[in-house]
């Protein structure tokens, strides 16, 4: 079972990684989900993940079975993590807005979903991968914005629509 210090460490790492992703969103003026929101998403996912991996140890003493048997017979512990994905999907859907036949907030909604994954990684102890993933995502978002990839695609799409008309 995780110690209090391990849980607190994972909580703080998740918070920092969420804040990093949120900072990227705020620096580019995307207020739908910034430091606070993504920090809460990563820490919430980490907390639920720590709960899911701690439950077998909490349930085990009163069962008369081995810890392995408790884990094998109760896949519900894993369902906690699966439900993070579903719940965050609803949160992300609320971020997406349609303006002038163009959806806005899709990237931020996808980042909220990815942030939950990063928080879950931290919660189950895959911290090096979570850190690497957060840094790569922040870098890719920054790089794609600097390269104006979405604007280039939108311009080509607009030209194609006008030529068909």
Image (tube, rainbow, N blue to C red):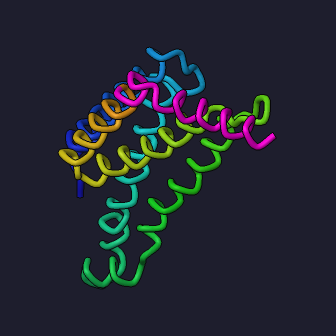
- Percent x, y of residue 126: 23, 52
Quadrant hosting residue 63: bottom left
Q: Is residue 38 above or below residue 124?
A: above
Q: Residue at x 35, y 45 (%)?
A: 118
Magenta residues, start to end: 143-165
Magenta stretch prevailing secondary structure: helix
Quadrant hosting residue 42: top left
Q: Is 157 one of the magenta-colored residues?
A: yes
Looking at the rendered image, the quarter that the C terminus falls into is top right
Q: Nearer the viewer, residue 67 or 53?
A: 53
Q: Is 91 one of the magenta-colored residues?
A: no
- Percent x, y of residue 160: 67, 40
Q: Nearer the viewer, residue 54 or 122?
A: 122
Q: Is residue 10 above or below residue 31?
A: below
Q: Nearer the viewer, residue 119 or 133?
A: 133
Q: Residue at x 29, y 46 (%)?
A: 122
Q: Is residue 10 above or below residue 143?
A: below
Looking at the rendered image, the quarter that the N terminus falls into is bottom left
Farthest residue, direction front: 163
Q: Residue at x 44, y 15 (%)?
A: 27
- Percent x, y of residue 75: 42, 76
Tally of numbered tags: 0
Q: Nearer the viewer, residue 96 or 120?
A: 96
Q: Residue at x 34, y 34 (%)?
A: 140
């Amino acid at each position: 079972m995780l110690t209090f210090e391990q849980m607190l460490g994972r909580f703080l790492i998740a918070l920092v990684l969420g804040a990093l992703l949120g900072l990227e969103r705020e620096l580019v003026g995307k207020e739908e989900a910034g430091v606070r929101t993504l920090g809460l998403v990563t820490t919430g996912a980490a907390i639920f993940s720590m709960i899911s991996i701690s439950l077998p140890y909490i349930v085990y003493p009163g069962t008369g079975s081995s810890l392995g048997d408790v884990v094998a017979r109760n896949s519900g512990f894993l369902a906690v993590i699966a439900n993070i994905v579903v719940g965050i999907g609803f949160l992300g859907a609320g971020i997406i807005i349609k303006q002038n036949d163009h959806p806005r907030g899709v990237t931020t909604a996808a980042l909220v979903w990815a942030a939950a994954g990063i928080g879950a990684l931290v919660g189950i102890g895959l911290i090096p991968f979570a850190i690497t993933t957060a840094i790569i995502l922040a870098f890719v978002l920054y790089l794609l914005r600097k390269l104006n990839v979405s604007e280039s695609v939108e311009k080509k799409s607009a030209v194609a629509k006008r030529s068909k008309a």
